[in-house]
Image: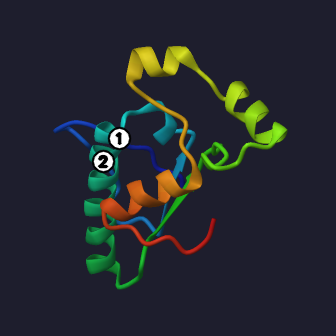
Amino acid sequence: ALVGGSFLGADAALPRDGHIYILKWILHDWSDVACGAILSNLWAAMASAARRGGWVPRLLVLEQVLPEDDDSSEAAQRARSELDDVNMWVVYGGQERTVSQYLALLSAHGFRTERV
């Protein structure tokens, strides 16, 4: 079953019995600090699910990613300009990230990456 929830603030309400948690086009909308709050709340919900159900819940993150900083190819430069969303940065403090930036963000909040 698909169950929604709130992942920010003191009133974060996430299902505590999920097998799979999905964030699709969410993290890029938020600053690293807000992403940390989102991921910490998810981690708590997932830990509760693991204790109650005896399984290991999974987090699926679906995001477009920027090319790594050391990629100077024409395709990488085009991708950077196409993913440049000034409104996202100004209003929410969000940012597009590279794979290595997402890996660091997830790792800092207890998650282990299995596959990109």
The amino acid sitting under disc 1 is Asp
Instruction: Determine the image quadrant of residue 53.
Output: bottom left
The amino acid sitting under disc 2 is Gly
Tell me residue 14's x, y (percent): 33, 50
Q: Is residue 13 left or right of residue 22?
A: left
Mark 2: which secondary structure? helix
Residue 32, disc = 1
Q: Is residue 91 above or below residue 43?
A: above
| Spatial CA span between label 1 and label 2 | 6 Å
Name the residue tied to disc 2: 36
Q: Is residue 33 left or right of residue 60?
A: left
Q: Residue furthest right?
A: 74
Q: Is residue 75 above or below residue 105?
A: above
Q: Is residue 92 left or right of residue 75?
A: left
User: How are the residues colored?
Assistant: rainbow
**Which residue is at the front of the view, 111 or 9?**
111
Q: Residue furthest bottom?
A: 54
**Which residue is at the front of the view, 56 or 114?**
114
Q: Quadrant of the C terminus?
A: bottom right
Residue at horizontal 28 percent and vertical 77 percent from the top: 52
CB atoms at circles 1 and 2 under 8 Å apart? Answer: yes
